[in-house]
Image (spheres, helix red, strand yellow):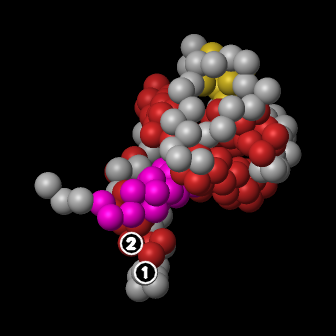
């Protein structure tokens, strides 16, 4: 069994990879689906679900981190935000969550409690915090793949398979680009 010498670095890298996967999903949702209603939930669209990812991060940053000096990003309008705005916002909120994780790592593995955290559904050890955020985003990324299929708008294989190319995302982040970006 291999040992991870830099567990904090590994945890932060895992978050960055999950964020790249979310960014990949946002970048590759076809324009025709951007405002399509989700089957069974007509008030929700691909756009509103994707904006929800940023807004959820922003709310958690405000709840857990604001008291500790981590600035919460502005929320986006789920009905009006465009792809470019969302990708820029996701970059900011990804860094905010990374700061929360780093705060927990530097505090001995626990995100320090905050007065704003009253729901208490999430244990604040860094492992659970990371797993919660990754699982939340993975749930919605998968939800969109299923919704596209239900609308007879199957996403290209390169796009759905791209959600699972975590080693490729790590290489893209840590090594200079040698080939053109994927679709």
Q: Main secondary structure of the magenta part?
A: helix
Side (left or right) of 60 relative to 167: right
- Expressed as whole percent of the image width and height from the top left, the position of residue 153 reads 48, 37
Residue pictured at 66% horizontal, 54% vertical: 99
Stretch in magenta: 4-23
Please name the residue shown 68% across and 17% down the image: 119
Q: Which residue, given by chain and number where applicable, does mark 2 sit on?
A: 171
Q: Does the magenta segment cover residue 31?
A: no
Q: Residue furthest top?
A: 40
Q: In this picture, is 101 found above or below 110? A: below
Q: Position of residue 141 (x, y in %)?
A: 50, 38
Q: Is residue 12 left or right of residue 59?
A: left
Whether tag 2 and tag 1 are in contact, CB under 8 A, the answer is yes
Secondary structure, mark 2, is helix
Q: Is residue 63 visible?
A: yes
Q: Quadrant of the N terminus?
A: bottom left
Q: Secondary structure at mark 1?
A: loop
Q: Residue 13 magenta-drawn? A: yes
Q: How dense is the environment of label 2, judged by Cα within 10 Å: few (below 14), some, or many (20 and up)?
A: few
Q: Quadrant of residue 46?
A: top right
Decide which of 77, 120 is in the foreground and name it: 120
Rendered image: mark on residue 11: none
Determine which residue is flagged by label 1: 175
Residue 37 higher or lower than 90, as above or below = above
Residue lying at 46% horizontally and 62% vertically, measured from the top left:
9
* Residue displayed at 64% across by 50% down: 103
Q: Position of residue 111 (x, y in %)?
A: 61, 40
Whether residue 42 sits left or right of residue 181 in the image: it is: right
């Amino acid at each position: 069994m291999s040992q991870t010498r830099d567990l904090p670095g590994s945890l932060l890298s895992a978050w960055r990879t999950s964020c790249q996967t979310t960014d990949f999903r946002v970048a590759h949702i076809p324009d025709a689906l951007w405002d399509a209603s989700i089957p069974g939930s007509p008030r929700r669209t691909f756009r509103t679900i994707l904006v929800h990812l940023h807004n959820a991060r922003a709310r958690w940053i405000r709840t857990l981190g604001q008291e500790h000096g981590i600035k919460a990003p502005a929320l986006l309008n789920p009905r009006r935000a465009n792809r470019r705005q969302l990708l820029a916002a996701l970059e900011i909120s990804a860094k905010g969550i990374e700061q929360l994780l780093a705060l927990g790592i530097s505090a001995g593995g626990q995100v320090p409690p905050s007065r704003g955290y009253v729901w208490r559904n999430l244990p604040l050890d860094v492992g659970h915090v990371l797993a919660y955020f990754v699982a939340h985003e993975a749930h919605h990324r998968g939800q969109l793949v299923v919704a596209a299929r239900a609308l007879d708008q199957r996403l290209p294989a390169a796009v759905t398979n791209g959600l699972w190319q975590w080693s490729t995302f790590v290489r893209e982040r840590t090594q200079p680009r040698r080939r053109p970006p994927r679709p």
